[in-house]
Amino acid sequence: MQTIALLPGDGIGPEIIDEAVKVLRAIEAKYDLKFQFKESLVGGASVDIYGTPLTEDTLALCKDCDAILFGAVGGPKWDGLPKELRPEQAILGLRKSLGLYANLRSVILFNALSAASPIKKEIIGEELDIMIVRELTGGLYFGKPKGIERTHDKTRAFDTMEYTDEEIKRVARIAFEAAQRRQKRLTSVDKANVLETSRLWRTIVTDMAADYPDVKLCHMYVDNCSMQLVLNPGQFDVILTENTFGDILSDEASVLTGSIGMLPSASVGDGKPYLYEPIHGSAPDIAGSGKANPIACILSAAMMLEYSFGAKDAASAIRNAVEKALNEGYRTFDIQVGAKKVISTSEMGDIIVKNL
Ligand code: NAD
């Protein structure tokens, strides 16, 4: 029995989590897997009831589970709150408390959606499958000192970019192992021509390559990588990069797939539980309308089956069921290119279950 913490959150979060649970229940019926779901409030929904986006009880529940499936948090209702009470603090708090230092973002363009990509078909090709491994808890966003100083004649703001060898090694290990499970090609992205942190990054990743002789490692400067993602995205298998570069590159890569509603992610650390979530936000503009695309959340559940429970077959079955639904012409409102039938959030969940 695997225990799964469900944190639906705000906006479309509860709607898409419902569909992922529907799919996981169908998986239980077909595979030798058993799930126990434990649900808790998080984000704005938690602020409304408990006055904080992440309670100690919710954190304890998560620590007690084998994996976490997270919907999305935030919305205009809570935008005016002080920083520490904002719904987004829940996700930062979970990453920090659970030591989730690597984010794996799976960028998959399904053939049926290739016309929805903003990149020309002759460049994007029929399909795309890139895994971006982004360092999540270090670098510029967390380095100290950071601040803003004002004197009578000027204002100075500063951030610190820092990485230790251990921080680099642990995320690089995740990326090498991901490459071993895939096409065995790893592109480590840095700015080693300018930054000291990048020079250390490149040295360590190069040294580690000896432990993974089956993986072909290459290095690329971040500015070139951002260009290559739109010029020739098919060249990439796994991309490894630090926090800030990863933030920017993974958003750039996500639009290649046609809709933000398609992309799953996993945040992992040294021990369980890992956290799985769609990359999109709570989409308050469409919440409650049945227009949300549940596929990113359903594919996040597939990542959970593979990474946390080692159930690769069940994960592939979900991906195939999603692909079949798209090939049959079923679309939610965000991906209408090539649609035979535009359907609601729950109808998409039903079709994917039927295809399993
Ligand atoms: P968003 O991702 O919520 O929405 C951007 C656009 O994409 C909107 O037009 C939305 O309707 C659409 N969209 C997003 N997901 C979709 C889906 N599954 N199906 C169909 N359409 C979808 O980003 P935003 O509007 O900048 O932010 C809204 C709220 O979400 C904010 O409060 C923000 O802070 C929060 N947010 C949360 C997370 C998270 O929980 N991890 C991530 C990003 C943003």
Image (cartoon, rainbow, N blue to C red):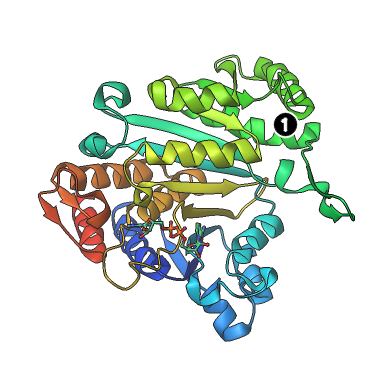
Rendering coords of residue 212 (x, y %):
61, 19
Whether residue 134 can be seen here: yes
Toward the front, the furthest residue is 153
Q: How many numbered discs?
A: 1
Task: In the rendered view, tell whether residue 15 sits above or below residue 96.
Answer: below
Q: Which residue is mark 1?
A: 169
Q: Quadrant of residue 203?
A: top right
* Apparent side of residue 50 relative to residue 73 in the rendered image (left or right): right
Q: Going by the image, does 114 lie left or right of 106?
A: left
Which residue lies most toward the bottom here? 49
- Residue placed at 72% from the left, 26% from the top? 198
In the image, what residue occupies the spot 48% across and 70% down? Answer: 75
The CB of the residue at mark 1 lies under 8 Å from ligand 1: no
Q: Would you say 231 lies left or right of 293 here?
A: right
Depth check: give the residue in front, 245 or 320.
245
Camera-side residue: 245 or 106? 245
> Residue 267 placed where, x, y %?
57, 48
Badge 1 element: helix
Q: Which residue type carries mark 1?
A: Lys
Question: In percent of the image, x 26 and y 21: which residue is there?
Answer: 122
Spot occupied by residue 167 in the image (x, y as percentages of width and height):
75, 37
In which quarter of the view is residue 240 placed?
top right
Residue in the image at 14% along x and 48% along y: 339
Relative height, residue 220 to residue 9 (above, below)? above
* Residue 138 seen by the camera: no
> Where residue 34 sits: x, y (%)?
41, 60
Foreground residue, 175 or 333?
Answer: 333
Judging depth in this view, the residue of 136 and 268 nearest the camera is: 136
Estimate how packed mark 1 is, as few (under 14), some (14 to 19) or many (20 or more) residues with alpha carbons within 10 Å.
Answer: some
Write down which quadrant ligand 1 falls in: bottom left
